[in-house]
């Protein structure tokens, strides 16, 4: 007997027939003798619809009331699943976030989970009753409904799995696992049997949007074994586990685990910045104060002028703010010109295997060079190499890198 958390996303909950199929799956785990808590998303499209209502009601809506509105989608789907389970003879009841309670911070619309009362939950499920819990919602100290930010049900599921000390947290979704890269770009992309938390964090944050990034960070911190799998097919998905739970032999075989890309960055260049202590600080301090998260940074020295050009990337959404901040700090920084480009893409190769191998970056650079793709900036970490390239080359870059690192599936999956 095991304690299992099952989470179902919006597509899996999108309609009564689908909810029936979800209930069958839950029943399957109960029939095996497992204690089960189920976390559900709102029915597909429902949260978007509710958000839109708020926007139409007022462009300056109160975020506390926005949370009351958008949290209702999950209330509906959890009640419906409980009804469906009962109709199949499975003991079940719903638990709203405020009933458990799932305590959150005061940051309405993007709250963090602070604490979950595991006792109530444990009592509920030990009696053999399935607990159906709406994802995405909780309650603040003040006793008001709060939501966790879009995609937040994944984080709810992991937090509940951690509080319950669950043996596994299964995330059922409309894809059947985590792939070596986006299968829409590379039909020969392969489904990964296992991936480490660290790799998943890198893959999620650079654009492989299977799970909310925060949920992966939380799973890593609390060591919750996660599985991403399809709610429409009966086959194992991808396990997301601690590095220690992957055999060395498996890991070393595979140098690179996956290739991700992110098109939502913009490049900014400042020319003729004085080559002296403090100039770089003068650029990045005001950006940090404006809460802009700078990612890649390159500084080039020009011998003729004795000055440097500084290039870096910021999220596209923060570009206007960044340009404004830098224009205001022009005298202090002392640059000549500022230019920017949103037609860029960050492509990353990720893999814990690269810790013990040399030459990963060289292979990446050579592969791109062979296709005439220019690299505008580079960043590396222990398990990742990222390059900034022209956006138009994204698909080509991902494809040739997938082949270069031997990730292509043997049979043509297309
Ligand atoms: N229903 C919420 C959303 O669409 C939360 C979730 O599904 O994870 O963002
Ligand atoms: Mg989701």
Image (cartoon, rainbow, N blue to C red):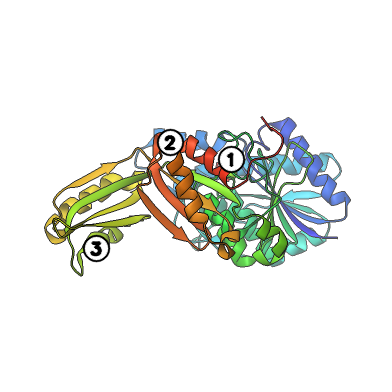
Point out the residue furthest to the bottom here.
277
Q: Which mark is residue 280?
A: 3
Q: Earlier in the sequence, mark 1 or mark 3?
A: 1
Q: State left or right for residue 218 relative to residue 305.
A: right
- Name the quadrant containing residue 114: bottom right
Of 69 and 10, the residue lying toward us: 10
Image location (x, y in percent) of residue 68:
51, 46
Q: Is residue 389 above or below residue 331?
A: above
Q: Is residue 74 above or below residue 330?
A: above
Whether disc 1's CB lies below 8 Å from ligand 1 is answered: yes
Q: Is residue 21 above or below residue 308?
A: above
Residue 188 visible within the image: yes
Of 152 and 116, the residue lying toward us: 152
Give the residue number, with chain letter if any, for mark 2: 393
Dots 1, 3 in contact, CB < 8 A: no
SS at badge 2:
helix
Identify the residue at image location x=31%, y=56%.
298
Give the residue number, with chain letter if any, for mark 1: 73
For disc 1, the neighbor class at 10 Å (few under 14, some 14 to 19, many from 20) is many
Instruction: Give the position of the N terminus as an image quadrant.
Output: bottom right
Instruction: Give the position of the C terminus as an image quadrant.
Output: top right
Real-space Cα distance between discs 1 and 3?
A: 47 Å
Image location (x, y in percent) of residue 320:
27, 44
Q: Which mark is residue 83?
A: none
For disc 3, the neighbor class at 10 Å (few under 14, some 14 to 19, many from 20) is some
Q: Is residue 185 above or below residue 98?
A: above
Identify the residue at image location x=34%, y=50%.
314
Real-space Cα distance between discs 2 and 3?
A: 30 Å
Image location (x, y in percent) of residue 286:
24, 60
Query: Which of label 1 and label 3 is nearer to you?
Result: 3
SS at badge 3:
helix
């Amino acid at each position: 007997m095991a304690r299992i958390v099952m989470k179902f996303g919006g597509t899996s909950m999108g309609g009564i027939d689908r909810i029936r199929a979800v209930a069958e799956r839950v029943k399957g785990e109960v029939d095996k003798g497992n204690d089960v808590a189920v976390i559900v998303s709102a029915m597909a499209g429902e949260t978007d619809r509710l958000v839109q209502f708020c926007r139409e009601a007022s462009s300056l809506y109160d975020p506390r009331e926005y949370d009351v509105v958008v949290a209702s989608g999950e209330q509906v789907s959890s009640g419906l699943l409980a009804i469906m389970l009962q109709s199949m003879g499975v003991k079940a009841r719903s638990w709203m976030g405020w009933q458990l309670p799932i305590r959150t911070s005061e940051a309405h619309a993007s709250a963090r989970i602070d604490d979950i009362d595991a006792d109530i939950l444990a009592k509920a499920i030990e009696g053999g009753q399935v607990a159906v819990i709406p994802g995405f919602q909780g309650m603040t100290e003040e006793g008001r409904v709060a939501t966790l930010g879009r995609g937040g049900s994944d984080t709810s599921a992991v937090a509940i799995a951690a509080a319950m000390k669950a043996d596994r947290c299964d995330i059922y979704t409309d894809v059947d696992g985590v792939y070596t890269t986006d299968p829409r770009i590379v039909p020969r992309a392969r489904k990964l049997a296992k991936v480490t938390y660290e790799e998943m964090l890198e893959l999620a944050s650079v654009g492989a949007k299977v799970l909310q990034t925060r949920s992966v960070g939380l799973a890593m911190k609390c060591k919750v074994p996660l599985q991403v799998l399809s709610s429409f097919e009966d086959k194992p998905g991808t396990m997301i586990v601690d590095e220690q739970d992957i055999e060395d032999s498996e890991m070393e075989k595979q140098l690179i685990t996956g290739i991700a890309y992110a098109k939502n960055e913009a490049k900014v260049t400042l020319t003729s910045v004085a080559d002296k202590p403090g100039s770089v600080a003068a650029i990045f301090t005001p950006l940090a104060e404006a809460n802009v998260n700078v990612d890649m940074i390159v500084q080039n020295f020009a011998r003729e002028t004795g000055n440097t050009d500084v290039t870096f990337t910021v999220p596209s959404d923060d570009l206007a703010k960044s340009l404004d901040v830098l224009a205001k700090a022009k005298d202090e920084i002392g640059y000549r010109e500022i230019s920017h480009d949103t037609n860029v893409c960050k492509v990353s190769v990720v893999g814990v295997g690269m810790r013990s191998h040399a030459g990963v970056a060289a292979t990446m650079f050579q592969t791109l060079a062979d296709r005439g793709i220019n690299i505008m900036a580079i960043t590396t970490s222990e398990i990742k190499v990222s390059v900034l390239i022209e956006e138009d080359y994204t698909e080509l870059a991902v494809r040739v890198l997938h082949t270069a690192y031997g990730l292509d599936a043997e049979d043509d999956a297309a």
